[in-house]
Image (cartoon, rainbow, N blue to C red):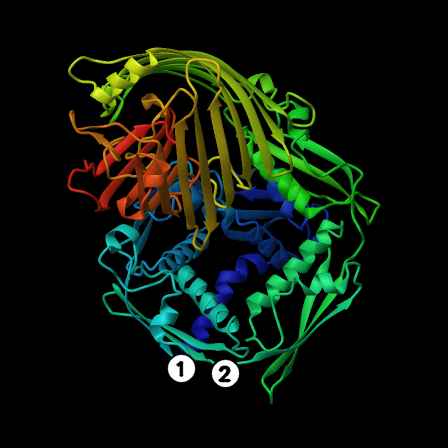
């Protein structure tokens, strides 16, 4: 019975192949192809290894069949002889008329379409079922890596006329599997909770519906394993190893259990530390850069930082492509690691040419004057990095990319290429809005940050609200002189109703003009000096203005001409002017009303902003302001309209704007003070979705501050404290700031305001 079955299979095989071999060798007089629909005859002949006039043998016939199958155009090929003519019968594969994808959320349609195109599954191409099967398998793997083990992917092939098909992928993603437990087996030196605290993966929390914690992801697990490895290697465990990782899925495919088996090994310390190689920089200077010291616990991170710092130091002197390799020598018995840093500075590299591309609106010289690297000089990595930061801080460009391609035919020259992406530098806005403090706002403004590509800033503005009516025009030339002295000319008019701003009531009208110069002292230090003329008219409102205001005006008059002489010093290392994430900003400023006119007073303030990048895109910010003023000469005190105020979005959030500090007892309204102290502490979070990092910043904050009658009366116990969350959005109509703040330390008379927002804010 078994032998009969084998005979039947052999006969069947012979029947299948017989059309290609049922002839004796013959000379092909003509070739005829049957069954072609979309594929041209010429294309078929191009792939066919048999030509007219050749002798066709069994071997050539088999080769012809294989060649036509390899094209992927046909799902069946048959050859037979008809007289002296070779007849080829083919059945074409259908072409793809349309591809549709349904149900995908975690993987975008654009990404899926691009992936299908890479493997040949694209509209207009020949349809191959095996490729579709591979695509389904790969999509399953992709969704599994996202923790969606219950995903279902159904492929439907709908035949169409003219040998075409429509392919539909219907995806049911399902819910991501939840991590029920993560175990680290073999960890003895550190508590498991300490190690899991380094992980991005975690079990579900009470806020999982917000931060997606508890969801399993293969990519995150791989990242966490590398984090775990780095954690041990940075703490001396040189032979730490992850023995195995098991990911167990429950039958429901909704729960995941992760088990990580580790071998810690012994802890090692640093022995001798040497520096060898071609030391073009004194060894003592390089040794001062080392982060590793004899006797300390071995740390891979410290070794890498030491190599990096040596490379950076060599880059200052033009050795831009220096190699610094740390070679460890391990004494297993003593558990000591001797380190030798081998320094290969390579050639000193010079800059042949600086090229600028992409500046379609900005003039070449505007870009070049910000570049600190010089043509013909040796390539200095810090100067190149500083040049990039300066260009980013201009606010003209959405992106700045730097490349240093080597000059062909040389081994010590490069070109320095700056490729910039122009951003929007002009803004026209007209409309109306609403601010919590300002009320209904009417706005008309035109601003050119890069006027006609010159780098000059020109702005004209009109604002009208229940508090202020403002008209302002200014022109700033950042390079009034070739060495970077800036000049700003301005004229302005302002009318204020203090009662509408929650303040003790008065009315003011001020117009003026000024000129200010900024002088660079160094790359980060700058001083400013200015002179402004102001004419101010103050009036009170009967029955509303406090008696102290009325008495002050009775003693000093109601109309004032003032020349204000101002000076400032600033130190700025921020990497960006907007949404900085590293660096410092310090400013000390003072202004004094020149004696001889109607008023004599001064104001002094100090501001600081500090940005510290952390991990996972987090940034820690600390900032603060301390300010004080007073009268001198015939002006016995600081004019009340020059007082400081606090409370609100831009100072101490959670308290109503301008309400902190001294109050007038007869009307129970804040009158401000001659001194102010405010501190802000914030943790900035990365933008919640891709592409929003340039226009949205989220944070959790703690604010502290208050206003005091005088500088001598500043007292820590009088500070008000609040905590909350905040968002700043750079919208098309301007910067919008929102905050939810809860007063933590307050007085019973303080006016609280949990939700606050404003249009136009500092960042």
The answer to which image quadrant residue 439 occupies is top left
In the displayed orientation, state which residue is furthest to the front: 634
Q: Quadrant of the N terminus?
A: bottom left
- Who is closer to the viewer here, 628 or 745? 628
Q: Residues within 10 Å of mark 1 (few under 14, many from 20)?
A: few
Residue 604 percent across, percent down from the top left: 45, 32
In the rendered image, the vertical position of residue 373 relative to residue 545, given as above or below: below
Front in this rendered view, residue 2 or 509: 509
Extreme residue in the right direction: 409
Do residues under tags 1 and 2 come within 8 Å of each other at their CB atoms?
Answer: no
Q: Is residue 30 visible?
A: no
The image's mark for residue 464 is none
Provide the residue designation for mark 1.
188
Callout count? 2
Decide if residue 280 is on the left or right side of residue 21. right
- The picture places residue 495, in percent across and down from the top left corner, at 33, 13
- Residue plotted at (33% across, 71% down): 193
Determine the CA span between mark 1 and mark 2: 10 Å
Q: Is residue 1 left or right of residue 35?
A: left
Q: Which residue is mark 2?
A: 265
Does residue 555 lie above or below 666 as drawn?
above
Q: Is residue 612 left or right of residue 154?
A: right
Q: Quadrant of residue 550?
A: top left
Residue 709 horizontal/vertical position (percent) = 30, 34
- Above or below, 276 against 200 in this view is below
| Image quarter of the C terminus | top left
């Amino acid at each position: 019975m078994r032998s009969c079955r084998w005979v039947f299979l052999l006969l069947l095989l012979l029947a299948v192949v017989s059309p290609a071999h049922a002839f004796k060798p013959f000379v092909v007089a003509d070739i005829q192809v049957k069954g072609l629909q979309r594929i041209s005859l010429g294309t078929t002949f191009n792939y066919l290894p048999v030509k007219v006039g050749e002798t066709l043998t069994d071997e050539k016939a088999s080769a012809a069949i294989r060649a036509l199958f390899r094209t992927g155009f046909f799902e069946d090929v048959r050859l037979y002889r008809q007289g002296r003519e070779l007849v080829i019968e083919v059945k074409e594969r259908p072409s793809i008329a349309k591809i549709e994808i349904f149900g995908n959320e975690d993987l975008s349609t654009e990404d899926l379409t691009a992936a299908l195109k890479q493997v040949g599954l694209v509209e207009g191409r020949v349809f191959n079922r095996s490729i579709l099967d591979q695509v389904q398998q790969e999509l399953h793997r992709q969704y599994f890596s996202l923790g969606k083990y219950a995903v279902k992917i159904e492929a439907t092939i709908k035949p169409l006329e003219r040998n075409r098909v429509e392919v539909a992928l219907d995806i049911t993603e399902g819910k991501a599997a939840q991590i029920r437990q993560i175990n680290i087996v073999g960890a003895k030196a550190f508590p498991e909770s300490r190690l899991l605290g380094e992980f991005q993966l975690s079990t579900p929390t009470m806020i999982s519906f917000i931060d997606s914690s508890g969801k399993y992801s293969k990519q995150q697990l791989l990242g966490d394993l590398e984090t775990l490895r780095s954690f041990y290697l940075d703490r001396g465990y040189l032979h730490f190893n992850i023995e195995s990782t098991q990911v167990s899925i429950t039958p429901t495919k909704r729960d995941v259990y992760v088990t990580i088996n580790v071998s810690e090994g012994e802890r090692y310390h640093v022995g001798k530390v040497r520096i060898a190689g071609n030391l073009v920089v004194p060894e003592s200077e390089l040794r001062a850069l080392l982060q590793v010291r004899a006797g300390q616990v071995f740390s891979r991170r410290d070794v890498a930082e030491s190599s990096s710092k040596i490379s950076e130091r060599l880059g200052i002197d033009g050795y831009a492509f220096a190699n610094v390799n740390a070679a460890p020598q391990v004494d297993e018995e003593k558990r000591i690691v001797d380190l030798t840093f081998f320094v290969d500075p390579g050639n000193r590299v010079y800059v042949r040419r600086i090229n600028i591309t992409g500046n379609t609106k900005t003039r070449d010289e505007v870009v070049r004057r910000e570049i600190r690297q010089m043509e013909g000089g040796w390539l200095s990595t810090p100067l190149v990095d500083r040049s990039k930061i300066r260009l980013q801080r201009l606010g003209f460009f959405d992106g700045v990319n730097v490349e240093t391609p080597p000059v062909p035919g040389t081994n010590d020259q490069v070109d320095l290429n700056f490729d910039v992406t122009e951003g929007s530098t002009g803004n026209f806005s007209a409309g109306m809005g609403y601010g919590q403090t300002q009320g209904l706002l009417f706005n008309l403004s035109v601003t050119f940050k890069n006027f006609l590509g010159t780098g000059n800033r020109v702005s004209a503005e009109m604002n009208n609200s229940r508090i202020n009516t403002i008209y302002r025009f200014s022109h700033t030339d950042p390079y009034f002189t070739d060495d970077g002295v800036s000049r700003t000319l301005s004229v302005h008019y302002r009318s204020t109703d203090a009662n509408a701003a929650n303040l003790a009531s008065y009315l003011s009208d001020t117009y003026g003009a000024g000129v200010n110069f900024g002088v660079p002292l160094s790359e980060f230090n700058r001083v400013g000096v200015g002179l402004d003329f102001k004419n101010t008219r103050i009036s009170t409102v009967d029955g509303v203005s406090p008696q102290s205001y009325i008495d002050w005006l009775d003693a000093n008059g109601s109309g004032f001409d003032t020349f204000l002489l101002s000076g400032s010093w600033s130190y700025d290392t921020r990497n960006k002017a907007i949404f900085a994430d590293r660096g410092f900003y310090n400013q000390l400023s003072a202004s004094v009303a020149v004696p001889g006119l109607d008023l004599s007073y001064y104001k002094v303030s100090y501001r600081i902003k500090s940005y510290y990048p952390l991990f996972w895109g987090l940034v820690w910010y600390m900032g603060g302001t301390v300010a004080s003023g007073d009268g001198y000469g015939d002006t016995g005190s600081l004019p009340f309209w020059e007082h400081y105020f606090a409370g609100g979005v831009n100072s101490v959030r959670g308290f109503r704007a301008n309400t902190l500090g001294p109050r007038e007892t007869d009307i129970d309204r804040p009158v401000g003070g001659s001194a102010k102290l405010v501190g802000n502490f914030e943790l900035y979070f990365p933008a919640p979705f891709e592409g929003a990092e340039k226009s949205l910043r989220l944070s959790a904050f703690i604010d502290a501050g208050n206003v005091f009658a005088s500088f001598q009366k500043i007292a820590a116990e009088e500070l008000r404290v609040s905590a909350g969350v905040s968002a700043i959005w750079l919208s098309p109509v301007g910067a919008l700031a929102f905050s939810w703040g809860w007063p933590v330390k307050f007085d019973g008379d303080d006016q609280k305001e949990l939700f606050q927002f404003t249009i136009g804010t500092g960042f």
